[in-house]
Amino acid sequence: MDFSHFRRLPIIDSHVHFVHPERMDQLLALLDEVPCTRANLVCIPNPDATTHNPAALFFKRHHPQRVYLSGALDYAPVLADWDAAPRLLAGQAAALKAQGFDGLKMIEGKPQARKLLPLPLDGEAYAGLWAALEAAQFPVVLHVADPDEFWDAQRCPDWARQSGWDYSDGSYPSKEALYAEVEHVLARHPTLKLTLAHFAFLSGDLPRAAGFLDAHPTVCFDLAPHLDMYHDFSRAPAAARDFFLRYQDRLLYGTDLDTRPLARNPDGYAFLRAIPWLIRSFLETDGEFNLPGQPALRGLGLPQAVLEKIYAGNFERVYFGR
């Protein structure tokens, strides 16, 4: 895939997962090729109560000029003293900042994670954390919900089911229940700096996405793809372009690049290269384009001034007030 025809602009990828320190050079090579000026390494907890935070800090020690860090919450002390969860979680925003993190990443709104860690986002356990995050203006990237298909046994893709993302048995919170929790948090903390990952899984309902952004002026969406996100946009290209122009200050470039495919799949590098190519083609191409073997998509052909905001300017404003 050729990246040479894209605009030569500074790019901050707001959504990159770095799990394997031994893959640091491969990730750097990928960022150089895409190209990407800096990456925000977003960390999440592991099922064994460890986190990706040490790997991210390792990367930053070696290449501080290439990354920002959004750390994960540490649940090890919470699991040891469940009743102390509100106090233990409330202090972690300051602790992450002291360690060198630039923000917080939460996967806790994903149904699979929510079932494993049954703490409502708007519940008592997180109340002090949200207050501390708002007071410090410490940015948060939150994954909330998932594609609609994952709640439907007939429509859930096999690869999602194999990943544990089939939510059709009734034991997982519904998509609307998760959205309601976020609404409650924002009602209590209206100046919270919140970025919802994967366009908040609202790419198929742009009027609802617009209403949500209008109601919550400090919320942004990132553009890391999910199942049919860019196909959703391409089915209504005029409406999508209007949306991106109207909310050009509220959208952050993100890819969801991840070192895990590099570790388990010899073709992982080619797969990862395709993601930024897809997103940049969508944002910059005026007309149809397609990934090999995939249905045609339609690009937005956005003006350079808008691209500059989405690629880097909005991230710098949200994270650093620039």
Image (cartoon, rainbow, N blue to C red):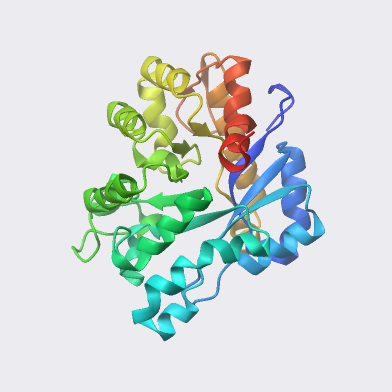
Residue 236 placed where, x, y %?
35, 20
Q: Which residue lies furthest to the front in this view?
A: 135
Q: Residue furthest bottom?
A: 80
Residue 318 relative to residue 58: left or right: left
Q: Which quarter shows the N terminus?
A: top right
Whether residue 144 can be seen here: yes
Residue 136 placed where, x, y %?
53, 52
Total residue callouts: 0
**Closer to us: 46 or 266:** 46
- Residue drawn at x 45%, y 37% as measured from the top left: 221
- Residue drawn at x 48%, y 80% as measured from the top left: 77
Residue 228 relative to residue 311: left or right: left
Residue 320 quadrant: top right
Whether residue 72 can be seen here: no
Where 3 sits versus 221, above or below? above
Where 39 sits versus 79, above or below? above
Where 153 sits versus 233, above or below? below
Where 277 sits versus 68, above or below? above
**Closer to us: 158 or 217:** 217
Residue 302 placed where, x, y %?
55, 17
Q: Which residue lies furthest to the left in this view?
A: 170
Residue 208 relative to residue 254: left or right: left
**Closer to us: 169 or 269:** 169
- Residue drawn at x 56%, y 42% as measured from the top left: 255
Q: Which quarter shows the C terminus?
A: top right
Residue 224 placed where, x, y %?
50, 41
Residue 175 relative to residue 43: left or right: left
- Residue drawn at x 53%, y 25% as measured from the top left: 282
